[in-house]
Structures are given as structure tokens and as C-alpha cells.
Image (tube, rainbow, N blue to C red):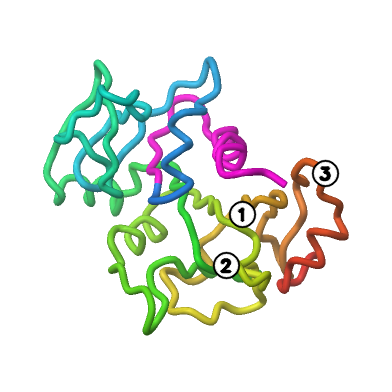
Amino acid sequence: MWDRNQMAARAAKELQDGWYVNLGIGIPTLVSNYIPEGVTVTLQSENGMLGMGPFPFEGEEDADLINAGKQTITQLAHTSYFDSATSFAMIRGGKIAMAILGAMEVSEGGDLANWMIPGKLVKGMGGAMDLVAGVGRVVVVMEHTSKSGESKVLRHCSLPLTGAGVVDRIITNLGVLDVVEGGLKIVELADDVSEADLRQATEATIV
């Protein structure tokens, strides 16, 4: 199976030259460390930063430079800063080509649940609702199953939705799946993972 860094590296292959891309909290933040050589992308953070660099080395952190997940990041020569209203105008106005987001659950129809577990975790919707409604493409990066081994790739999400029918591609520690008519299509398998392994771990319909 892929670990978190390998999942982020695989997600980085989704980036295309010239794109403006938003990285969500969690595994997606690692994508900035794996941008392919020869590909120029501009990373946007909804807290008001365009042109995020990779994570800083230990001892070189600047507490004033943070992403939406409050992690310290670096700036680049072309980095710009702006208020939250301008940031969300970019997102809602369709200026961001792709969002790479984490998830708690994804359904075979592309429904996304990534903001709360009633009674346990309520972290607030944040910018996720605007992102899934406003960007051109949504890629989810997540663990395929819960700690108890239950599938998080479902026929129907059980948690409150962030957006309905918004996910285009799912990247997990087991492989890559596309949301297509009738269910999910296997695009790629992770290292040493068989199709049978992936199917067994997936509640959703695989076509």
C-alpha cells in the first residue's frame, strides 16, 4: 500500500502546467513537496495566499506564513497576499482549476463528506463547500478504510455532505478510482495491492 507521502506524490501527478490549485488540510498539504519537474503550478490557500512554496526546513519556519490548516509554509518570489473575500472570489469565480482535498467518506456518485462527524468531530465547514462548488476538478486523497477496517468509499455517505456529486477522482492508499456513470472505475492500483484487495475494501460499486 502507499503511505501518506506516496499518496501525495501520486496526487501531484494530477497537476498540469499553468494551473492554479488549492490544497486541502491533511495529506493534500504534502502535495506541494512533490510537484513534478517541468510543471509550474500556483498553489492557492483560502486564508489569502497565492503562490505557496513547500514546507520549511526545521528551524526556518516563519510563524506568520501559514496555510489554511495553520501549518507553516514558505513563500516564493511571485507569492501574493490578499483578504479572505478576494480569496473566495477566486474560488467562487471559477479561477481555481483543481482542488485536492481530504475526506472522511466518498460515495460512488461522487458525494463528499469531509467536515464533521456528529458528536465527535465538528471542525467547521471552512472553505470546502465553496471549493467543491467552484473549482474545475476535485480530487480526493484519503485512507481507503477506517482504523477499524470499514470502507470509507461507500455506496452512500453516512456523514453530512460537503457537496453532492462533486468528486472526479479518488486517490487512496490502495489505488486510484474515477467516478463514472454507474459507480467507480479502477484507474491504478497501489504497490503490491491486487484488484481483489481493492474490491474487498470498497463498499461502493466498482464498474
| Rendered image: mark on residue 170 | 1
Residue occupying the point 56% across, 77% down:
157
**Quadrant assignment, res 163:** bottom left
What's drawn in magenta, residue-wise?
1-23
Instruction: Give the left or right position of residue 194, taking residue 117 as reference.
Output: right
Q: Nearer the viewer, residue 15 or 116?
A: 116
Give the residue at mark 2: 106
**Which amino acid type is marked by label 3?**
Asp
Q: Residue 40: where, in percent of width, then height?
A: 44, 21
Q: Nearer the viewer, residue 19 or 1?
A: 1
Farthest front residue in view:
59
Give the residue at mark 3: 192
**Which amino acid type is marked by label 1?**
Ile
Earlier sequence position, callout 1 versus callout 2: 2
| Rendered image: mark on residue 61 | none
Q: CA distance from mark 2 to mark 3?
A: 23 Å
User: Please, what secondary structure does the residue beneath circle 2 have?
Assistant: strand
Instruction: Give the left or right position of residue 173, taking residue 60 as reference.
Output: right
Contact check, label 1 and label 2, Cβ < 8 Å? yes
